Structures are given as structure tokens and as C-alpha cells.
Amino acid sequence: MRVAPPPSTTVQDHVALAEIELCGELMIAASATEGERLSADLIDEVLKVTPAAPRSP
């Protein structure tokens, strides 16, 4: 039985890789928390999200 060799070029989807990394960070945070759910503040902290500044009318 012959197996085809892997392609010579590697295709990477950088957006998908970043999303996978963020999901992993959330899973680690969720497994380390004592509560049933992560708070919105903790999720923002894990994802390194900052609140948006309020818009002036």
C-alpha cells in the first residue's frame, strides 16, 4: 500500500489559528474557575478585550 506524500506547501489560516488559541484560553480559564460559568468580565480579561468608549451624540 502506498501513501501519498504530504503536499510540499503548508496552508495556514491565521484567523482560524487565532480563534483556536482564544478558545483554548477560554477552556483553560473555565477549568480553573470554581463557579459554574465565567463572568463577562473574566471572559473579557482572558480575550484581552477592553470596553468601548461611550459615543458622544
Image (tube, rainbow, N blue to C red):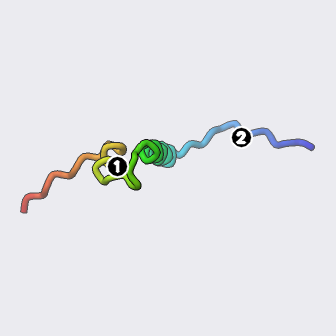
In the picture provided, is 36 more to the left or to the right than 44?
Answer: right
In the figure, residue 54 lies in which quadrant? bottom left
Q: Which residue is mark 1?
A: 43
In the picture provided, is 36 more to the left or to the right than 51?
Answer: right
Discs 1/2, front: 1
| The residue positioned farthest toward the bottom in the image shown | 57
Q: How many marks?
A: 2
Q: Quadrant of the C terminus?
A: bottom left
- Which of pointers 1 and 2 lies earlier in the amino acid sequence? 2
Q: Residue at x 41, y 55 (%)?
A: 36
Of the numbered discs in the image, which one, if any, rests on residue 7?
2
SS class, disc 1: helix
Q: Residue at x 22, y 50 (%)?
A: 51
Residue situated in front as seen by the camera: 31 or 20: 31
In the picture provided, is 33 more to the left or to the right than 49?
Answer: right
Measured as percent of width and height from the top left, residue 39 is found at: 32, 53
- Kind of residue at badge 1: Ile
What is the distance, in whole Å, between disc 1 and disc 2 at their CAs?
38 Å
Measured as percent of width and height from the top left, residue 46 is found at: 36, 43
| The residue positioned farthest toward the top in the image shown | 8
In the picture provided, is 41 more to the left or to the right than 17?
Answer: left
Q: Are marks 1 and 2 in contact (CB under 8 Å)?
A: no
- Kind of residue at badge 2: Pro
SS class, disc 2: loop
Residue situated in front as seen by the camera: 26 or 2: 26
Measured as percent of width and height from the top left, residue 52 is found at: 20, 52
- Graded by Cα atoms within 10 Å as few (under 14), some (14 to 19) or many (20 or more), the crowding at tag 1 reads some
Q: Residue at x 30, y 54 (%)?
A: 40
Let me know if residue 28 appears in the view: yes
